[in-house]
C-alpha cells in the first residue's frame, strides 16, 4: 500500500493510487477484532505503523472517499491502537524491561502514525511522552543506555545481534521523522542521543571498533560483549534519513553515518522499515552523490589457511571502509594470470 501510494505521489498514476486504496479498504472491510496471539501484542506494531503511514500518504487522493477513510480510521482506532497501547502499558504482563527495544519502538511509531492520520493529538502526544519518559526499552534513554566520547551511543540490543539493532533503531528514526513533520523535534532530544546510537552502530558495522559496556535486563540478557551476529552486513534502510537530517539539515558531524548511507545508496526498502530514503529524504543532491566515490583501496593482511577440502581466507577491511563487497582472485603459479574465483558482498 505504501509503495503504491508513493508511486502515485511521484508519478500521479491513478492505477497506483487505486491499488493502494484497494489494499487499505480490504483490510478495513475485514478486520473486526483486536489482534491477539503470541507475537501480535507487541510486534504487530510494525505493520500497523506501516498501514497508518501509507494512509497518510494517500490521504488527499480523490479516489479514496471520505467514507472509506473514516472506516479505515475506525479500524486503526478501534482494533489496532488498543493492542499497541496495551503492550506499552503492560508488556504482556511482563516486567517493563523484559522486552527488547524493537518491541517498544514499533508500537511507539505505530501510535504516533495513527495519531497523525486520525488527527488525534492525544495519541500523538502519548507516543512523544513514551519516547522521552517511557518505562520500557523503547524510551530514548533505555534504548541508548550508554554514551561515550566521540559522539557514540550503545544501543540496547548491541549485545544481541546487529539485525535487531538496525530494526529497532530504524523504527525509532522513522518515528522521529513523523514527529518532525508535525513540528516536534525528537531527533535532537537529550543532546542528539539517537544520532550517537546511529554513529556507534554504523562505526561497528563498518569494521571499526567501538566501546562496549556490560548490559542486562529483567530477563537476564547478561551481554558481556558486542555481538558478532550480522556484523558487517548493510541490513538497514534508515541511514539516508539519519544522514540527511543530522548532517545535511543540521550540519552535524557523523562520518560513519555518512559512509553507511553512501554504501547503501540508492537505499532500498525494507520489510519492517519503509526505507527508500535516497528517493524520499534527500535534501541536497550535491550532498548525496551517487556513486559516492571511486574504487576503494585494496584490502590488506590477506592470509590463507589450509582446511579440510578448503582454504580459509581472512583479510583486513579496505582502508577506506567504503567497500560494498570483495572479489577474490587466484593464480595457480607465481607468474601466472589471476582469475576470479569468488565474490562476496555485505549481505553475505
Image: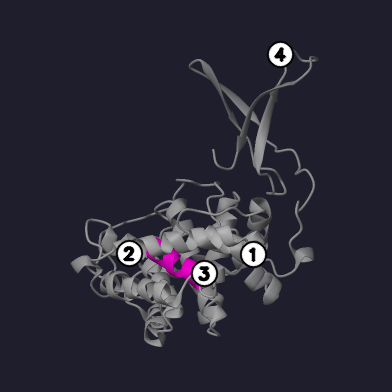
Question: For residue 332, which numbered disc appears in the image?
Answer: 4
Label 2 environment density (alpha carbons within 10 Å; few <14, some 14–19, many ≥20)? few
* Front residue (pair 160, 347): 347
Question: For residue 12, which numbered disc appears in the image?
Answer: 1
Could you say whether the residue bearing mark 3 is in a helix, strand or loop?
A: loop
Label 1 environment density (alpha carbons within 10 Å; few <14, some 14–19, many ≥20)? few
Disc 4 to disc 3, C-alpha distance: 66 Å
Could you say whether the residue bearing mark 1 is in a helix, strand or loop?
A: loop
Residue 99 seen in the figure: no
Q: Which residues are magenta?
A: 47-58
* Front residue (pair 43, 341): 43
217 displayed left or right of 1: left
Disc 3 to disc 2, C-alpha distance: 17 Å
Return the residue at label 3: 63
Residue at the location (70% across, 37% down)?
300
Residue 269 place in picture, x, y as percent: 55, 54
Disc 4 to disc 1, C-alpha distance: 57 Å
172 displayed left or right of 313: left
Q: Are marks 4 and 1 in contact (CB under 8 Å)?
A: no
Label 3 environment density (alpha carbons within 10 Å; few <14, some 14–19, many ≥20)? few
Mark 2 or mark 1, earlier in chain:
1
Amino acid at each position: 500500500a505504501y509503495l503504491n501510494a508513493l508511486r502515485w505521489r511521484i508519478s500521479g498514476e491513478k492505477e497506483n493510487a487505486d491499488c493502494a486504496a484497494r489494499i487499505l479498504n480490504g483490510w478495513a472491510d475485514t478486520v473486526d477484532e483486536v489482534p491477539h496471539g503470541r507475537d501480535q501484542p507487541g510486534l504487530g506494531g510494525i505493520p500497523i505503523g506501516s498501514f497508518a503511514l501509507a494512509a497518510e500518504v494517500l490521504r488527499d487522493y480523490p479516489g479514496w472517499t471520505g467514507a472509506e477513510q473514516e472506516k479505515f480510521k475506525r479500524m486503526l482506532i478501534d482494533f489496532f491502537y488498543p493492542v499497541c497501547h496495551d503492550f506499552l502499558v503492560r508488556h504482556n504482563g511482563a516486567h517493563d524491561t523484559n522486552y527488547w527495544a524493537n518491541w517498544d519502538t514499533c508500537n511507539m511509531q505505530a501510535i504516533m502514525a495513527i495519531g497523525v492520520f486520525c488527527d488525534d493529538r492525544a495519541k500523538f502526544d502519548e507516543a512523544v511522552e513514551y519516547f522521552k519518559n517511557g518505562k520500557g526499552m523503547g524510551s530514548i534513554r533505555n534504548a541508548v543506555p550508554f554514551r561515550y566520547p566521540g559522539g557514540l551511543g550503545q544501543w540496547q540490543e548491541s549485545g544481541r545481534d546487529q539485525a535487531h539493532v538496525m530494526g529497532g533503531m530504524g523504527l525509532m528514526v522513522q518515528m522521529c521523522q513523523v514527529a518532525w513533520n508535525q513540528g516536534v523535534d525528537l531527533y535532537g532530544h537529550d543532546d542528539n542521543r539517537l544520532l550517537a546510537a546511529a554513529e556507534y552502530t554504523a562505526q561497528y558495522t563498518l569494521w571499526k571498533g567501538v566501546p562496549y559496556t556490560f548490559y542486562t535486563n529483567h530477563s537476564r540478557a547478561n551481554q558481556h560483549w558486542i555481538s558478532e551476529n550480522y556484523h558487517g552486513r548493510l541490513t538497514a534502510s534508515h541511514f539516508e534519513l539519519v544522514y540527511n537530517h543530522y548532517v545535511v539539515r543540521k550540519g552535524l558531524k557523523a562520518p560513519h553515518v555518512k559512509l553507511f548511507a553512501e554504501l547503501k545508496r540508492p537505499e532500498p526498502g525494507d520489510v519492517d522499515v519503509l526505507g527508500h530514503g535516497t528517493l524520499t529524504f534527500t535534501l541536497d543532491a550535491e550532498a548525496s552523490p551517487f556513486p559516492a566515490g571511486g574504487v576503494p583501496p585494496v584490502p590488506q593482511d590477506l592470509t590463507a589457511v589450509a582446511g579440510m577440502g578448503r582454504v580459509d581466507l581472512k583479510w583486513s577491511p579496505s582502508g577506506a571502509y567504503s567497500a560494498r563487497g570483495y572479489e577474490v582472485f587466484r593464480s595457480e603459479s607465481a607468474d601466472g594470470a589471476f582469475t576470479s574465483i569468488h565474490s562476496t558482498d555485505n549481505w553475505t
